Image (cartoon, helix red, strand yellow):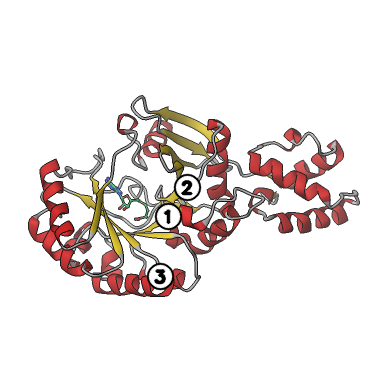
Amino acid sequence: MNKTDVSGFSKDELLQYLASLSEKTGLKIEKFRAGQIYSWLVKGVSDFDEMTNVPSRIREALKEDAYIALPKVKAKLVSKIDGTIKYLFELYDGECIESVFMRYEHGNTVCISTQVGCRMGCTFCASTLGGLVRNLTPSEMLGQVIAVEKDTGERVSNIVMMGIGEPLDNYDNTLRFLKLVNDPEGLNIGQRHISLSTCGLCDKIRKLADENLQITLSVSLHAPSQDLRAHLMPVARKFDIDELISSCRYYIEKTGRRISFEYSMIHGENDTPECAAALRDILKGMLCHVNLIPLNDVRERSYVKSSKEAIEKFSSVLEKAHITVTVRRRLGSDINASCGQLRRDSIKEEA
Ligand code: SAH
């Protein structure tokens, strides 16, 4: 397909594109059309014909030359418990991804995917089971937020990049997305309202630190020692835990921002008192926060989640050392809102 994706443009880029379209077609396209088209895209139109204040001759030229990469809702599960909505979105080429809409007191949050599949291979995660298919474009990341706002009719104020995929394995598109989503004439979501989660690509953590962004970095640690971490997460064989902690220290030093360490609690694997003590020793004195996540069951995996008691004991070891800890509340437990599973079901149905 040689058409241009207009939904990934900033307003200035759209202006430039329209100028080139005007030149190519000989059609007069006034400058203010860029603003009109841009605001339609932010509202989530999926067809140029919905842009009712744009003359049909321009809409026809756009249809010939361009497309809108807005994800289509393919399936949707709504939690009866807390209203969390899990979306299965279909992309322009038929690939599917997931996003989750959650209502918190501090505002509506969308968890977005950054890749179709994932190649990181974490042993407890559903998203990685079929490997990586492709990267998402910036417009496909943005489009998830726009499509959720359109479907719910509600404004989204926070974004977490914790869906399918490894955002730092798709670095350039992720960075471009972070700029686009910030645009006051676009979605206007500030960096302080965005969290990015990584499994620990140390070179990219350092690169990100140098970008001078205000986003919250979450790091999936899941183990306090190199051996255990490498057993759970193949990425640790490339970047060991000492290197990871040192790149996290660099990030904190450069940005002055607290890192959030994610730690999924897996029964008998990483939830022992010894693990808690080792984690405490690594993180003591660091500007950080620990988020304990009771493991979500994944059908294809044999791991079991930790007991409530084990999680409480673990968390009290950290608290005694003045490390702030929260246990993630599980929203959408009745719709299996954890990532990767809906997409896998859709692949299996088609097979
Ligand atoms: N690739 C990124 C973001 C995706 S996953 C990363 O690795 O951080 C978001 C979080 O969910 C990560 O901390 C991930 O390790 C965790 N996770 C994956 N599968 C899980 C499961 N079955 N139960 C609990 N947490 C899980």
On screen, 110 above or below 346? Answer: below
The structure residue drawn at horizontal position 69% and vertical position 49%, both measured from the top left corner, is 6
Q: Position of residue 28 (x, y in %)?
A: 90, 49
For residue 256, which numbered disc appears in the image? 3
User: Is residue 269 among what the camera can see?
Assistant: no
Q: Residue at x 30, y 75 (%)?
A: 246
- Quarter assignment of residue 344: top left
Q: Secondary structure at mark 1?
A: strand
- Residue indicated by mark 1: 195
Depth check: 91 or 93 in front? Answer: 91
Mark found first going from the N terminus, 1 or 2: 2
Q: Are marks 1 and 2 in contact (CB under 8 Å)?
A: yes
241 or 278: nearer the eye? 278
- Residue 297 at what x, y percent from top left? 24, 39
The CA span between labels 1 and 3 is 15 Å
Q: Which residue is mark 2?
A: 158
Few, some or many residues within 10 Å of mark 3 (<14, 14–19, 20+) = some
